[in-house]
Amino acid sequence: MEYQFSPAADFAKLEEAVARLYGPAEAARQAGRYRELLRGLEEAFGPKERAAVFSAPGRTEIGGNHTDHQHGRVLAGSVDLDVIAAVAPNGERVIRIQSEGFPMDVVDLDDLEIHPEEYNTSGSIIRGIAAWFQRQGCRLEGFDAYTTSSVLKGSGLSSSAAFEVLVGNIINSLFFGGQCDSVRLAQIGQYAENVYFGKPSGLLDQMGSSVGGMVAIDFQDNANPVVEKVGFDFSAAGHALCIIDSGADHADLTDEYAAVPNELKEICAHFGKSVLREVPEAEFTAALPVLRLKAGDRAVLRAIHIYAENRRVAGEVEALRRGDFEAFLALVRASGLSSWRYLQNVVPAGYTHHQEVALALSLCEQLLDGRGACRVHGGGFAGTVQAFVPLDMLEGFRAGMERVLGPGVCHVLTIRPVGGVRLV
């Protein structure tokens, strides 16, 4: 393993890498952040002669709401918020990761079986990723890592996927000779989340973080997704990409999230299939009378959303490639309406007093006044909404959102061109 960077002597090398990754305008601020990262490593684990430094970004879902778990199409982008890590060898058969503000995770490399008591913990993610690599013949060694994150918790920007991509990059780079490409690293993260963490998620989050930039992904063959870069600058089109925190809490919504794929499974079961991508839309439409009785109207409406959303993603990609931003915005608006009306992931069932996501979308529409576009972001029910805001309206839009929802809820993001990466 090559931990070529010396925290005490070689910080100039890291500063150069930081400037390349974040750009000149952010270089000084980010360099300070990395100094604090290295200080955190030594405070947690003692002085280190050698280290390696990594970064993995959060991601935003630009198009394709809930399509990934049905092997559909998505349009995603990595963002300029990330989880970073400083890593050093410890000479033991143990991985120790201290994430700022959280208890330390400790994983024994001689015990990489599934631990049900670890479900829904970051320790299970580390164990699952390490187990995958070990099964491929990777000669794992123990290391200490300190991490800190600028990815907003509960924002739909997927700090959890960024952490998975970060851990995968650490092991791949230090112990596996970099054999895994960005797509494989995303799949490893999904494996750990599905099998060790206990969450049956799709692959969108990990792909958005791992690959980098704006990417169109077709999950028809989930083992070999088709990934295409989509080069487009929203600011050059006169718009800012905003994520607005609705203030809604994700707690106690597990059943709401699980109901979406579960209801779609009922639709697919009628055809002897496992995901909606395997069911021709014409056959689905012909079977509507039976499907309503078998699976219920909400399941049928959710399937209608998935079919149309896959077409919208293809349309969004085509619009961006030909530079037709107004056509892109129209499809974003249509996506948002479909999520609210058909997918029904804006207001949890039975909620009347608390409808934060719906209120945030209503405010967006009022403030945009027919311009730009907005939609629910990510899983829905809680968390965030996404808006494309004309630059000449940005300050007024932000002020209007924060007047109602609270200070600091409107975040202006840019698409980061690089996914998970080792800096030094």
Image (cartoon, rainbow, N blue to C red):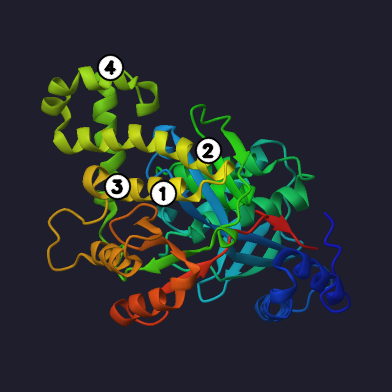
Residue drawn 37% across the image and 69% down it? 245
Residue at the right extreme of this rendering:
9
The answer to whether residue 185 is left or right of residue 238 is: right
Q: Is residue 258 above or below residue 418?
A: above
Q: Which mark is residue 116?
A: 1
The answer to which of marks 3 and 2 sits earlier in the sequence is 2
Residue drawn at the location 45% of the way across and 58% of the way down:
121
Q: Looking at the image, is mark 2 or mark 1 earlier in the sequence?
A: 1
Type of the residue with mark 2: Glu
- Mark 1 or mark 4: whose residue is earlier in sequence: 1
Q: Nearer the viewer, mark 2 or mark 1?
A: 2
Apparent side of residue 85 relative to residue 327 in the rendered image (left or right):
right
Instruction: Name the residue carrying label 4.
Output: 283
Query: Do labels 2 and 1 touch, CB within 8 Å?
Result: no
How far is mark 2 from mark 1, CA to CA?
Answer: 44 Å
- Please state which of residues 124 and 355 is positioned toward the viewer in this rendering: 355
Q: Quadrant of residue 327?
A: top left
Image quarter for residue 346? bottom left
Where does residue 213 sit, x and y in percent of width and height?
A: 62, 52
For the residue marked with disc 3, what is the amino acid? Answer: Ser
